[in-house]
Amino acid sequence: MERYRIRILPFPVRPSAMVAVCAFLMCLPLSRQAFAKDRLTLNTVVIDAGHGGKDAGCVSKDRKTYEKNLTLSLAKRLGEKITKAYPDVKVIYTRSDDKYIALSERAEIANRNNANLFISIHINSVNATSPHGFSTHILGQSSDKNRDLFSYNMDVCRRENSVILMEEDYTTTYQGFDPNDPESFIFFNLMQNAYYEQSLLFAAEVDEEMSKSPISHSRGIWQDPFLVLWKTKMPAVLIEAGFISNSSDLKTLRSAAGQDAIAQRLFNAFKSFKTKYDGSLDYAVTASARDEAGQQQSYYGIQIFALGKRLPEDDSSFKGYDVEAVRSGTIYKYVIPASSKDAAFILHDSIKNRFPGSFVVKVDGSDVRRQAR
């Protein structure tokens, strides 16, 4: 588990920032469409080729290679592999040629098409030439106790997010989000992504598969405030497929064989994720899951607390998570469901600071038993 670096570090909040956040939250839809019957199979995927048009993204040292061209090629190769293997899966590209697409529009393309998965492909870059390898990112608030690593990841976020400055009236579109202001990242701490766990599990599939690609050095799974993931209403992952600033990575990224090998690994991750997604009644194992006899199915989760009363589903103490109230005698045990025991421990590691005293459990009807790692 050492590779899965999911970090949370609180930031101070200005009153003005809190007002902006609350205003935005009031506009968020409360739909549970992810649990609708027609979404029990992964039938639509949106592949986002990062940058494009006037936004070149990162550029190689010799100025001959642009990130926007590499991401488009990788996106198309991945899409073609998915279409060939799964003709019934609808593959949608945020862009299919060299044109500029706003970050908010990329998410809206996925939302309008009721996608089950959003994959955003990017290429990394730093001033030094030695850093290399790939990394995988899910929505969250970036932090790290190591100042150098923290500064590095903040720089990555600022670079990827700074494209909003090219958009007209971006302060309205993004509710005042400033990619150069660390306090703006408080937005992401308060906007809990309902698809956090699914995103994390797909990211784990990508990390495992990409470790077998020509660019095999894993820089881990990161939790970061990328705007392109912000408004998506489905599992969403951003992949930095390599470093354009590193000569070895660049050589692979420039070659057709290297691009195809990377696309194949991303497809393998998609295939594994889809198999698990389609093989369950609900990949999130929601509280509404029942067997044919009307009894609650067994599942793993994180018990966050227990009370002598039933709280409403949208109670603020759940902090935005979908929570199952399991009645045991006169006590209600409140559990955040997970898709497996391993997934429960991964999820618990990332939220235990938000729910002190929480622990992993197995739920079987009204029987809730604590689980050891």
Image (tube, rainbow, N blue to C red):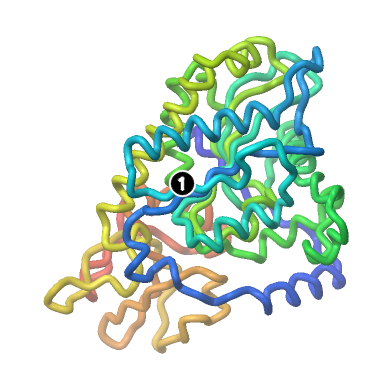
Question: In the rendered image of this protein, does residue 178 appear above or below residue 31?
Answer: above
Q: Is residue 21 left or right of residue 347?
A: right
Residue 199 visible in the picture: no
**Residue 102 screen position, x and y as percent:** 74, 51
Question: In the rendered image of this protein, does residue 204 appear above or below residue 288?
Answer: above
Q: Is residue 140 left or right of residue 216?
A: right
Nearest the viewer among 343 and 306 is 343
Q: Amino acid at mark 1?
A: Val
| Residue at point 62%, 16% (across, down) | 254
**Corner quadrant of residue 72:** top right
Number of numbered tags placed on the structure image:
1
**Residue 272 screen position, x and y as percent:** 33, 39
Nearest the viewer among 301 and 263 is 263
Residue 300 visible in the picture: yes
Nearest the viewer among 356 and 247 is 247
Looking at the rendered structure, the secondary structure element under dot 1 is strand
| Residue at point 27%, 57% (across, down) | 280
| Residue at point 49%, 54% (across, down) | 235
- Outermost residue toward the front? 97
Q: Which residue is mark 1?
A: 91
Q: Is residue 338 left or right of residue 2?
A: left
Question: In the rendered image of this protein, does residue 241 appear above or below residue 27?
Answer: above
Looking at the rendered image, the quarter that the N terminus falls into is top left
Nearest the viewer among 48 and 9 is 48
Q: Residues within 10 Å of mark 1 (few under 14, many from 20)?
A: some
- Outermost residue toward the left? 293
**Corner quadrant of residue 168:** bottom right
**Residue 79 screen position, x and y as percent:** 47, 37
| Residue at point 50%, 75% (across, down) | 31
**Residue 366 screen position, x and y as percent:** 23, 76
